[in-house]
Amino acid sequence: MVDHSSLKTGLKVPDKLKNHGCKPISMTYPSRQMTQATFTEIPTTDPTQIFETFRWRYASNILTAAVAHFGLFDFLKDKQLTPETLQDHLKLETRPFTVLLTALKSMGLIQTTPEGKITSSPDARAHLNSREPYYVGDYLGLAADSPEVLDLVERLRTNRPADIDNQGAAFIYRSGVKSAMNQSELARHFTLSLAGRARNVAPALAQKLDLTGVDHLVDVAGGTGIYALALLEKHPNLEITLVDLPEVINIAKDITHQHPNRHRLNLEEGNMFEWTPHTSAQAFLFSNIFHDWDIPECQHLIHHYANMLPKGGRIIIHDVFLHDALDGPLPLALYSAALFTLTEGRAYAGNEYRTWLEKEGLQATHPVPTAVHCGIIEGIRNEPSLQ
């Protein structure tokens, strides 16, 4: 459903566009780009560097927050601390602590000893500890009171997405959480803002994903339907059910209604945490979904859909994957920070997904890359479900 880092923290449709009688270009997305090429045509250029460049602002924000607001490197000095000790000192919950530490490890400023202790790198000890003669933290402090840094610090300390008390969470929905995805204009704005990334990645997913033996696939929280259309083009005998919230389904109808394979795509309204298919499905696709949610919700989703799998069925996770040690790569650590500020999730490592899948009795595969940092991990049901 989502790549969120291209949106500003405030999440709102820019007023200057409204005042000039214009719509954000994402609002015109279907008419601009849906009919220009097939959804399996892989672009000859690569937008990855564009996304990486945009996310660099999270690097400076995280580094400034760590030095100027949390005093992390002054506290560490040359000590070796357990993660629990450092987390307790910073007074951060597990999700924000993980996001912060992953980014600093990816920058080469935090290291993990063979015993699992946390320590500063030599460069960090020399230049980010205020007691050292070559300290540069005051330079970073020039940005300490900038709105983006202050907002990030607030997100880290509260462990809550941006603007959730006003317009509601931008990209997520579950019972008891105020969500912009229940509001027609906001749901359309946010959903279509993410369509460009899907348009670039969907052809690679269709090319790399082996759907041998799959007649019916469910695209869980499938958003615009772009991934579904690519898979339908690639597999002429495949039928797909796309389930999402009512406002998002309305957008998917607009985008998919003229596609020649639309008759093999069923659009169904539903809450993915509770929804069950009317007919058996051999595969459940989650494309850029889990990174919106914290670990308990991710485990719930895998448990819920794993119990519906027949023998040979699979859960397909299409997402970005951090290193298993949660120490990079840096572009994904920064994307994780973007996800953290706007959702209840973060980027996860491949071994985290494999652990959740194996807990449900599924055989987990290793990542297969697609495009723009994304990849595929599958959990395959080799034995009949006990449910």
Image: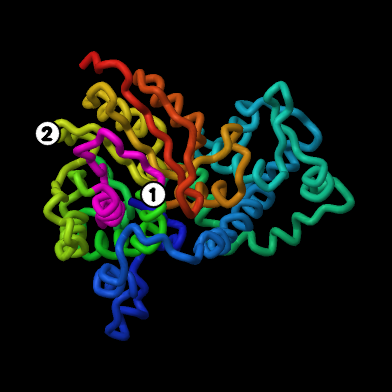
Label 1 crowd (10 A; few <14 / some 14-19 / many >=20): some
For residue 69: magenta? no
Query: In the image, what residue type sits under mark 1?
Result: Gln
Provide the secondary structure element on which disc 1 rests.
helix
Query: In the image, what residue type sits under mark 2?
Result: Thr
Which residue appears at 45% of the width and 27% of the height?
Answer: 354
The stretch of residues the image draws in magenta is: 207-235
Vertical side of 95 occupied by 227: above or below: below
Which residue appears at 24% of the width and 36% of the height?
Answer: 214
What is the number of the mark on residue 279? Answer: 2
Label 2 crowd (10 A; few <14 / some 14-19 / many >=20): few
Q: Position of residue 273 (x, y in %)?
A: 24, 35
Which residue appears at 54% of the width and 57% of the height?
Answer: 150
What is the number of the mark on residue 320? Answer: none
Q: Position of residue 210 (x, y in %)?
A: 35, 39
What residue does disc 1 label? 207
* Farthest-out residue, top: 386
User: Does the image show residue 180?
Assistant: no
Left or right of residue 89: residue 284 = left
Image coloring type: rainbow
User: Does the image show residue 30?
Assistant: yes
Vertical side of 381 occupied by 244: above or below: below
